[in-house]
Amino acid sequence: MKPLRIFIILAALVFAAIGFLGYRKKFPEPVSKQEVIPDIEPKVLLPDPPAPVALGHDPLGHDPLETIDEVRRFFSKGHDKFPIVETIAYKSRTPWIEGRPAWLADYAAHFQTSRHFIARSLNGKVDYETQKVAPGDKFNVFKEGAAVEFYLLVDLSRCVMDFYYLDLDRDERVFVKRYKVGVGRKDPRSPSGSLTPTGKYRLGDKIAVYKPGMQHYYQNQKVDMIRVYGTRWLPFSEEISDCTDGARGYGIHGLPWHPIDGTDNLIETGELGTYASDGCIRLVKEDMEELFAIVITKPTTVEIVPQRAKAHLPMGKERIFEDDGHAAR
């Protein structure tokens, strides 16, 4: 090939390369864009926390206290018993009785626990009468030295009575059970609107256990007392505060018993949840005997209010026990 032709070809290639480079500079290839995500934690919108609900109140109108019954914790010998009771074993010889064997009544007096209470725990069932005991038998008593009282709140508008124990050492009240009760007949002339007065009263120690055939005078007539007070009687002894009537003559007792079809056989009669008494608070036999067994050895206050919202419950804290035996606020 002639040198001139080679020169022309090389020059053409050089000019072509220069032209191509100029085009790329003027029209560069597009660069793909990437979204830049800032290093900021995104906000998560959470729902507002629910408003706190007062114990014993349900915004839907259901009261959880209606279904709670923790009475068994007084008598249980297991881990689920209340912390104010303890399980002990019977011994005929004790350091606090000298010169003779200790009877069950001695244990009751020493531990300030009623024989009815001990009997139910000893028997492992609802039996307040059988009190046979042998060395080694176990039963519950209130802890020696424990500062314990009881509190009964009666709501006249609903005919119910709430049962609490008060642990003075821990400054707390513990809900035990709600009882359905009967109260005094409605009376618009009474400050309470009922023959049952309102206010705070103390239960007295002139208690009574009645059985068929036990007679005393009532309204100037000798009658079977079971026909008036049922099987148990807990009298009011003194007024504490805001009482619309004196304590005398009022109390808590069972439903009255009456003869069946003109015979001498007696049966519990009457209804609870009604305004039918002369002013006393009535309970069905099973509830009355249960309450009686627990409270008769400890100071007990009864507060009667037109509605529960008007109550002045003591202690700053209230607890309800869970199924595992631990207290839950």
Image: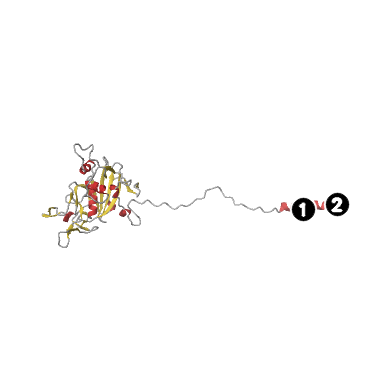
Q: Amino acid at mark 2?
A: Ile
Q: Secondary structure at mark 2?
A: helix
Residue linked to disc 1: 19
The answer to whether residue 312 of the structure is visible from this angle is: no
Q: Is residue 276 left or right of residue 1?
A: left
Q: Position of residue 21 (x, y in %)?
A: 75, 51
The circle on residue 72 is none
Please rate how many residues cluster around mark 1, counting C-alpha atoms within 10 Å: few if below 14, some from 14 to 19, many from 20: few
Cα distance, mark 2 to mark 1?
20 Å
Left/right placement of residue 54 relative to residue 233 reads: right
| Depth order, front residue of 245/122 | 122
In the image, residue 264 lies at what x, y percent?
Answer: 14, 59
| Number of marks in picture | 2
**Percent position of residue 134, x then y:** 24, 44
Quarter-of-image position of residue 260: bottom left
Residue 324 position (above or below residue 267): above
| Residue depicted at x 86% and y 52% | 6
The color scheme shown is secondary structure
Instruction: Return the residue nearer the eye: 318 or 94.
Output: 94
State the residue position of label 2. 6
Asked whether residue 179 appears in the rendered view, the answer is: yes
Left or right side of 237 for 27? right
Q: Nearer the viewer, residue 168 or 230?
A: 230
- N-term mark: 2 or 1: 2
Residues tagged 2 and 1 counted as in contact (Cβ below 8 A): no
Please state which of the two labelled residues, at mark 2 or mark 1, is closer to the viewer.
2
Q: Amino acid at mark 1?
A: Gly
Spot the residue most to the bottom: 261
| Crowd around label 2: few <14 · some 14–19 · many ≥20 (10 Å) | few
Q: Position of residue 103 (x, y in %)?
A: 20, 42
Q: Nearer the viewer, residue 7 or 209?
A: 209
Secondary structure of the residue carrying tag 1 is helix
